Image (cartoon, rainbow, N blue to C red):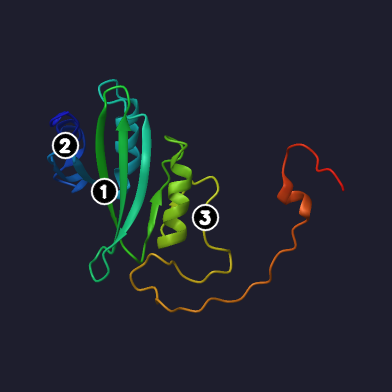
Amino acid sequence: MATIVIDALVARFRDPVKGDGVTGASVGAGGDDTAFVTRERLLEVCQFLRDDPGMQFNMAPYITAVDYLGQEPRFEVVYNLLSTTRNWRVRLRVKVSEQDAVLPSVCGLWRGANWFERYCFDMYGISFTGHPDLRRLYMYDEFVGHPLRKDYPLRGRQPLVTELEVPEEQFRGPGPARRSE
């Protein structure tokens, strides 16, 4: 891939006057090509990477967040994208402040982003506007806080919740009926 994708992103989306779009980029050894993208142009950049015939990034196999406690902006959401037709990978990094931890959802571009965005919401508290079903993924609804934030207390206590009564039929699932003995 060399620098084809990074050069295309910089040429198309770097706006030195506004300071938005692609604000930085690097080509790393072993395919670690990275572009820093602003929140305002994220969807536009992703749409280009997916739809442009020269790019064809048809998968978002992993999206996660990083907490840089003590820095501003505090969070960074990392989009790892893959073009299966060209066998190219690129990483987009979007900085997000703690006070305004909101990004546009890319679920409309890659359906698989749904669960990754829910993970970032649940574990870090980063919201995604336009997400079809933004709710906790791992933690229960009454859970207070976001456990992967670096300031989450290691020995934090959570509110107790009552255990749900689930009928035994739900545990069996589909399959052959059990014989009574």
- The residue where tag 2 is placed is 10
Cα separation, mark 1 vs mark 3, equals 23 Å
- Tell me the CA gap for discs 1 and 2: 14 Å
Image vertical order of residue 149 relative to residue 95, above or below: below
Label 3 vs 2, first from the N-terminus: 2
User: Which SS class for mark 3?
Assistant: loop
Name the residue carrying label 3.
Answer: 137
Q: Which numbered disc, 1 or 2, marks the residue that appears first in the sequence? A: 2
Residue 174, given in percent of the width and then of the height, sits at 73, 39
Q: Disc 1 or disc 3, which is closer to the eye?
A: 3
Residue 128 is at least partly visible in this image: yes
Direction right: furthest residue: 181
Nearer the observer, disc 3 or disc 2?
3
- Of circles 1 and 2, which is in front? 1
119 sits left or right of 17 in the view? right
Are the residues at dot 1 and dot 2 in contact (C-beta closer than 8 Å)?
Answer: no
* Kind of residue at disc 3: Leu
Q: Between disc 1 and disc 3, whose residue precedes?
A: 1
**Label 1 SS:** strand
Badge 2 local density, few (<14 within 10 Å), some, or many (20+)? some
Tell me, for residue 93, which label it has, or none. 1
Foreground of the two, 121 or 88: 88
Residue lying at 37% horizontally and 60% vertically, measured from the top left? 101
* Location of residue 43 in the rendering, given as x and y in whole percent from the top left corner: 35, 40
- Please indicate whether residue 25 sits to the left or right of residue 139 in the image: left
Name the kind of residue labelled 1 in the image: Arg
